[in-house]
Image: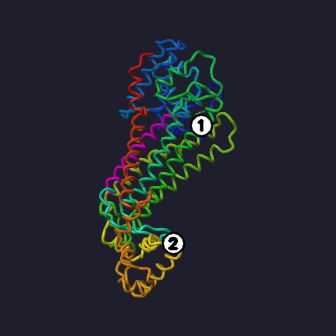
Amino acid sequence: MALAKTEASGGVSLLPEVLAFSSSLWLDKQLLTEDLVGSLAHVTMLARTGVIPAADAKAIRKGLLDIAAQSKAGTLELPDEEDVHMAVETWLSKNIGASSGLLHSARSRNDQVATDLHLHVREHCARALEGIVALLGDLLTRAHQSKEVLIPSYTHRQRAMPVSLAYWWAAWGAALVRDGELFVHALQQADVLPLGVGAIAGTSLGIDRETTRKLLGFSRLTLNGLDTVGDRDFALDYTYAAARLMVHLGRLSTDVIDFTSQEFGFATLGGEVACGSSMMPQKRNPDVFELLRGKSGRAIGNLTGLFATVKGLPGGYNRDLQEDRAALLETGPLLHSSLSICRVGLAHLTFHPEKTRAGVEDGFTQATDVAEALVKKGLAFREAYKKVGALVRRCQEDGLALSKVPLAVAQKVDPAFDEQVLAAAQPAAAVKAKESEGGTGPRSVERQLAWISDKAQALSKTARDVPRLDALLASLEKEQP
Ligand code: ARG
């Protein structure tokens, strides 16, 4: 790549190989909209405060808007520069002339890049929230359709207790709500304006950060310039939220991968989403879900990479921070594509209720429910546990399901068993009986689904209230300097 020398700094020009090594333009040109929006707000503020003449501000604003329009039309040619900030400045100097030199008054690339990244994180948190809300909507619909479907739950990947399929959907819904709340936290961390602290210590020029803040729709100003230019906490919070969400999608994927295996046989993936094998003609592989699980590793890598970048840095700006870019810029597309493909994959997942019910019966998963029925008759749980253990062993010897054991057989094992106690072994009854908070009983599940739905609405409102880049660009275009 041929790189121009950075004229702004004057002096001896950098060696081309140094420029090539240090340039981040190939990556941070993805931040062009953020950069233009930040500059439009900055130049508008500079004119309003009288730091620069209105006529120059008008020329700069027109230049910035031209760049935005050309970028949208796909005709923009950015000069090869050290980063997107210098590329925009060089473009302006070539296209609008001397006025361009006033744009960087009271600004450094240190607060400029921090502003771009805050805008970026805020935008992508809002988009992630929208994706989470859409996925939650799907999970809720599926849950409402599957309240009567029985399926084993698993601990240690061994059949544990019978639950409704609705309860399984609600479990992943609960995790996604927590992720949504984590993105709300990241959003709040990013919702603060860095611009105006300059390189590190503020400026003696008569700027008004409040004006810039309002123009960019941030809730507050950063407190201290020295902290501001070295701070990437908001980015860590965002990449952590992304990694945790991705890990949840990956774990949900493992359930799907297992459930659709021949060994489980609980569900089938439609041919539209199941990939074939290049050699084995019979294969229908859950690649989409395996990739979701695999990509969660990338998200974790981005988080740990960012942590490694900031670890040990002294206060203030250090060029190391430019290395935050790859992790941050990969995170948004990874999140949005994963959330949307997860919805597509799940839409083609069909459960087989007779198979999931057979899993409940074959696994003696109602054993705890029978023990609790004995407890209701006054037995100590440990006593009941032993008696049901003996009953299960007897059923295994006789090849009987727990729900099919005749009263006479059960009473031979232990006279404490009666009809009422054995009724607890009916899978549907076992699911219905667990009405404790957080349990799989129908009223409990109904409450869980209502809670998830309320939370989804709140997350959706938070996302709607975020000032988005397109809207900011449109509103800044209308501002008078
Ligand atoms: N490209 C740099 C970055 O992304 C911009 C800030 C550079 N600041 C500086 N003083 N060299 O971090």
> The residue under label 2 is which amino acid type?
Phe
Residue 126 in picture, x, y percent from top left: 43, 39
Asked whether the residues under the numbered discs 1 and 2 touch, taking CB atoms below 8 Å apart as contact, a structural biologist would say no
How many numbered circles are shown?
Answer: 2
Residue name at image x 63 percent, y 27 percent: 199
Q: Is residue 95 placed above or below 72 in the rendered structure?
A: above
In depth, the one of 416 and 194 nearer the eye is: 416
> The residue under label 1 is which amino acid type?
Leu
In depth, the one of 469 and 30 nearer the eye is: 469
Say which mark, if any, is on residue 181.
none
For the C terminus, the quadrant is top left
Q: Is residue 120 magenta?
A: yes
Residue name at image x 31 percent, y 60 percent: 146
Magenta stretch, residue numbers: 118-142
Give the colour scheme of this rendering: rainbow
Q: Is residue 392 placed above or below 47 in the rendered structure?
A: below
- Which residue is labeled 2 in the image? 381
Residue 232 in picture, x, y percent from top left: 59, 39
Q: Earlier in the sequence, mark 1 or mark 2?
A: 1
Q: Is residue 250 magenta?
A: no
Dividing the image into four quarters, tell me where ligand 1 lies.
top right
Residue 446 in picture, x, y percent from top left: 36, 54
- Which residue is labeled 1 in the image? 19
SS type, badge 1 = helix
Task: Using residue 395 as the reference point, say whether residue 1 is left or right of it.
Answer: right
